[in-house]
Amino acid sequence: MLEERILHEGMLLLYGLTVIFYFIDFLYHNQKANRIAFWLLAMVWVIQTIFLLTEIWQSASLPIQTFNDGLYTYTWIIITFSLLVHLFFRQEFFMFFISVFGFFVMIIHTLQSIKISDSTQIPVMLNEMLFAHIVLALVSYGLFTISFIFACLYFMQYQLLKKKKGYKWLRRFQDLEGLEKRAFQLIALAEPMLLLSIILGVVWAYMTGTEFYWGDSKTIGSIFVFGVYAFYLFMRIRQQYRGKLILTWNIVAFLILLINFFLFNSLSNFHM
């Protein structure tokens, strides 16, 4: 039914936002992001618990008889376990990755549920999934682009300071530390969006029967871009790299992104 599809999509939206906020918490140890992620996940848990209890009440048994029922119970267990870990342990790394996995399982369950209850809603759901995949990818690419511009401004200001000239121009820029920080923050926001986009794209391709394989140039390119920026975040956070070195990697990563967007897209078998 339409109402059921909208409810499932709402849960997916909340779960997707949970992944983003847990990623921010993972990077920054940000208490505010941590609390937001927890309450978003708690909202999903409440909705799922209501469905689970309703199913138990109606069937007088735990919903595990079918693959889809088992998938739903499995998703509920993942979310419950995630909330318990959040409450009793401080494990940002674990919370982010268990949220990504739970999001993937929930997508599969949502599509299976809609297919069983009202298969006519499946094409609409898949179209919306494709739309979300494209929008998330484009938004993440836009944020990567702005980060690249901040990196270029950093090097421009660095050269002006080194030559001790162009002070009128310098007043229009942030200081070097501020430019580097803004470039990092944009990548930190874009990276989980790109990850969600890749997950949605893979699920959409399999569910629609589109000719898809992991060796596709755009698929490899997107995963590689994600990996390049993940390495940037690793160097920036864990290795404490700052300044010219980390921003040079920012620029290299953006050039790889452009290659993926323009060249690999033209070589792909199913990306237009």
Image (spheres, grey):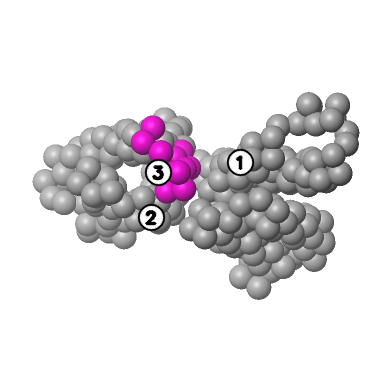
The answer to whether one can see residue 136 in this image is no
Of callouts 3 and 1, which one flags the residue occurring earlier in the amino acid sequence? 3
Q: Nearer the viewer, mark 1 or mark 2?
A: 1
Direction front: furthest residue: 164
Query: Where is residue 4 drawn, in percent x and y?
Result: 39, 35
Give the Cα distance between marks 1 and 2: 22 Å
Q: Quadrant of the C terminus?
A: bottom right
Find out whether the residues at labels 1 and 2 contact each other: C-beta distance under 8 Å: no
Quickly name the residue at label 2: 93
Quickly name the residue at label 3: 29
Of callouts 1 and 2, which one flags the residue occurring earlier in the amino acid sequence? 2
Give SS at disc 1. Answer: helix
Q: Residue at x 56, y 59 (%)?
A: 235
Question: In the image, is residue 21 part of the stretch drawn in magenta?
Answer: yes
What amino acid does circle 1 point to? Lys
Q: Which mark is residue 87?
A: none
Question: In the image, is residue 142 part of the stretch drawn in magenta?
Answer: no
Give SS at disc 2. Answer: helix
What amino acid does circle 2 point to? Phe
What amino acid does circle 3 point to? His
Q: Residue at x 66, y 50 (%)?
A: 243
Residue range corresponding to the magenta coloring: 15-32
* Snapshot quadrant of residue 258: bottom right
Q: Which mark is residue 181?
A: 1
Q: Nearer the viewer, mark 2 or mark 3?
A: 3
Magenta span: predominant SS is helix
Q: Residue at x 80, y 31 (%)?
A: 170
